[in-house]
Image: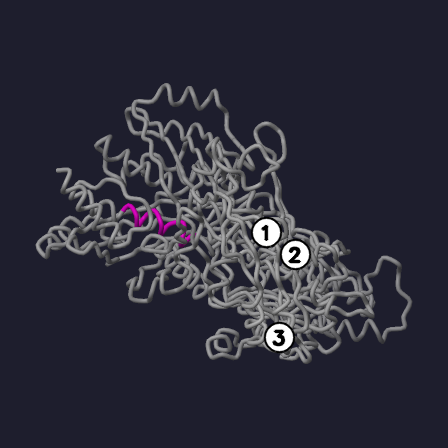
Amino acid sequence: MKFDQLRSAAGRSGDFDEPVALATGAGTYTADIDTPGALHVAFVRASEAHALIGPIDVRAARALPGVRAVLTGADLVAAGVRPIPPLVIFNGRDGRPMHGRGIPPLATDRVRHVGEALVLVVADSAAIAADAAGLVNCELTPLPAHVDVDAALADSAAPVWPELDSNLALDWEDGDAAVSEAAFAAAHHVETITLDDPPITACAMEPRAAVAAFDAASGRYTLIAPTQGVMVVRKLLAEGALGIDATRLVVLTPDVGGGFGAKVQPYPEYAALLAAAAIVGQPLRWVASRSECFLGDTCGRHSRLTGSMAFDRGGRILGVRADLRVALGAYTSTYVAIVATNNTKNCLSSVYRIGSIRMRSRAVFTNHIPLGPYRGAGRPEAIYLLERLIDRAALHLGMDRAELRRKNLIAPTAMPYAAVNGQTYDSGEFEAVLDRALAAADWQGFAARRRAAAQRGRLAGIGMCCFLEVAGGILEEPASLAFDTDGTVRVMTGAQSIGQGHLATLPRLVAERLGLKVAQVRLVQGSSDHVPGIVATVASRSMMMGASAILLGCDEAIRRGTLIAAHLMEAAPGDIVFEGGRFRIAGTDRSLGLMDLPTLLGASGAPRSADLPDTLDNTAKFTSAGMSFPNGCHICEVEIDPDTGAAQVLRYTAVDDVGRILQPEIVEGQIIGALAQGLGQVFGERLHYDARGQLLSGSLMDYPLPRAGCLPRPTTLTHEVPCRTNPLGVKGAGESGVTGALPATVNALLDALAQRGVDHLDLPFTPGRIWRALCERDAAA
């Protein structure tokens, strides 16, 4: 695709077969954009996790033939470039705002994590740029580094930011302390656990990439990059980093090869490229290597979770306490304040009737890549903690795991249910979901399968997870519709498709509502000059919020069209009915087509009243009365070879309530994909750092992504309970799979290991870690 074609507001037709195009290599990703005259960029990155920056010698790099520029952090500061700020900052429990620290496009006084960008090299080719980057000599004086969150929180820890008293960026809490104390004081049994939730990376199929340009005549910048929302990226880069009005920056996003939360961040390389494009005066291109993605993409999870659950004698949950220590990394990313606080807090009630919930979260600066949202973004942490507590409590209370959960489920007759953590559930049939999962997984038949496994020398285990997550995020979303004289309607939305199949869903909704053919509807996304709003594709909100706004836009077009058609046909608006894409005078055969109106409006010379709309075009905003609450029950069955520690998932059953389902195949794909990512974290995914902050798993040789053979074909079932707070009745579907998979699989593995006396093991459950746990238990026995 040509550079200028990407700027077009034409969008893609609703009948474009996007899945086939993407699967057969016909997609257009950032690296595919044809940019005549563009130069290439390489970055010099820090080899230390924490160090003072000394002299940077760029003379040899600049002397290399084909090198056009070599820029340091000092050069960008001189050009007026500033750190990229976070979008969200919360106040702590003392009322003071979080210590937010923006991400510098290039480091200046010190580096704060391995892989941080130090120098930008511009050259005629990518190979020359890489060679020149290797000639840059930068003196780094190492400083103490901390990657472990508790080590960084210690009073003796060296500060990541020396101007702060400690590495504590935010100390946040929620819940009634007195009610919590009373609940735990009255408890018959209190279960407590601490869980490690190690850092992981999104590892999207498409690495980050960017094309940056500056037009001196207009003073406008252009950035092409794979984002999860162009408007957030535009705002933070323009107003935050470049110090210009947002309208002077155009952000364009073509096809995106996976995001998973990581591509919502406006990255420092993007700001550096934009500044360099203005300095050099030519377009610049950069495509990250996979190693650069490991070193620079925002990571996910990275927290230590301590939780307690109070029970009465009958097994009823009286209260929950959660204490989170969240490793922020060296800088404060776009949405990390929400990830570290509200996203977890909002899910701590889950599907259970709980009398008291109290949570504390401490967000801590550490010497590694910044933390950001990763599929679930704080929600799986809450459910992982709850479901591990319930499984352990069932053992200590002598109760069946399923029945302990059943005893505490919120009944459908309680809806709308006001949870003590501030959420109001509009709908849900949690016991019906549990029962369907138990039947589909043949829970009762597991005992026989376990005996058969034992005869083969295997340890069999089964685990479950009942869960609820909170979807929607920011509860306002606009959408624009433009009706063209060629008989098409353009739908413009800030909801960026990153693999969820928006093109297969949104145009069909519009076509059905307006009585058009799908081919008449064109979806416009990924262009900051054309799409409305500010919110990105996060929080499983695209259908709940984006599609609902689009439907309101359709209804507004019908309202306007009714008035216009009445005027043109000299009838009363009350006599006009709209059906099948036409406005008809009731009781007659006189009608006008919806898509005829744009042309007729332009041709009509008849006088019109001031209150008569002059166009069908409109921007509608949907405001939801509340979040949506996708929920489900997942059951996992595993076997472990005790001689090697190798574990295998034999059966997996997922029953999900994602509200009304618009595209069953897409929903199934979302659940299975998220499920696979949850299993990836369980069985091996982890960013391993040594004590000095060096990344030890910085390639796919060391970072074990799940393969197709790791997962049997899961049984995926749905239990549709429509949401009552949006016109479509949908609930988020993008993240529930990972929320259910992580606890269900860990519970299954520990159920298997319990036969040999192992009652706790932290993520990940690699063969080596499982084998060592079994050996240590045998030695202790």
Residue that numbered label 1 is attached to: 53
Comparing 47 with 232, the one in front is 47
Q: Secondary structure at mark 1?
A: strand
Q: Are marks 2 and 1 in contact (CB under 8 Å)?
A: yes
In the image, residue 334 lies at what x, y percent? Answer: 59, 49
Magenta residues span: 736-747
Q: Name the residue tied to disc 3.
A: 64
Is most of the magenta stretch helix, strand or loop?
helix
Q: Position of residue 183 (x, y in %)?
A: 40, 22
User: Between 767 and 95, which is closer to the camera in this rendering?
Assistant: 767
What kind of residue is marked 2? Gly
Asked if the stretch drawn in magenta spans residue 737, the answer is yes
State yes or no: discs 1 and 3 in contact (Cβ < 8 Å): no
Q: In which image quadrant can residue 713 be found?
A: bottom left
Foreground: disc 2 or disc 3: 3
* Of the two numbered discs 2 and 1 in the rendering, the one whose residue sits closer to the viewer: 1
Q: Secondary structure at mark 2?
A: helix
Q: Give the amino acid type for the residue marked by disc 3 in the picture.
A: Leu
What separation in Å lies between label 1 and label 3 (alpha carbons)? 24 Å
* Badge 3 element: loop
Label of residue 73 in the image: 2
Q: Position of residue 567 (x, y in %)?
A: 82, 66
Location of the C terminus (image quadrant): top left
Residue nearest the observer in this picture, 352 or 223: 223
Query: For residue 30, which quarter of the picture?
Result: bottom right
